[in-house]
Amino acid sequence: MAVSIIMMILGQTMAVFFYDWTVQYGLQESVEEVGLLGVEVNRSFGAADSVIYVPLMVASLIGLLKRKNWSLYLLAAVGGVSFYWTATVTFIMLFFAPGTPNYTYVPGIEIWIFVGAHFIFGVLAIASLIIYRDRLIA
């Protein structure tokens, strides 16, 4: 989760304020690939991740390290967000965005690895709460 927090801050939070910088470092897609609307969609995901997802991850991680019961609720929220946004992004990239004006982006294997890892993390976070709830904070 700590690596995800760093990646979200670099790729998502920075995209809200310095989109070109994130494109330069391969953390976001260029306007030539996704069009102006795609850039704004990416920035919107970045803003939502910055004010909801990242704080939930940070608080959950701190709570888990301190073995606090409330961290389990936050972990459930993190897991839910993780597999929800990955499903949303997958639908956008595979079904809805292709064919729209100025959208030429073809996700590479690294994108699918990133999206897949977050999907698996989300499923495992929820599963771990179901299976190991008491041991996570014992």
Image (cartoon, grey):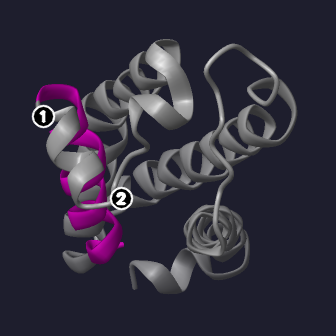
Of 95 and 35, which appears nearest the observer?
35
Range of the magenta residues?
1-17
Query: Residue 15: within the magenta?
Result: yes
Residue 36 drawn at (x, y percent): 44, 15
Which circle marks residue 18 in the picture?
1
Circle 1 or circle 2, nearest the eye: 1
Of 13 and 125, which appears nearest the observer?
13
Mark 2: secondary structure: helix
Position above or below: 9 against 124: above
Residue 130 drawn at (x, y percent): 72, 69
Q: Quadrant of the N terminus?
A: bottom left
Which circle marks residue 71 in the picture?
2
Mark 1: secondary structure: loop
Q: Is residue 10 among the parts visible in the rendering?
A: yes
Residue 72 drawn at (x, y percent): 46, 59
Position above or below: 90 against 71: above
Q: Residues within 10 Å of mark 2 (few under 14, many from 20)?
A: many
Q: Residue at x 68, y 13 (%)?
A: 101
**Amino acid under disc 2:** Ser
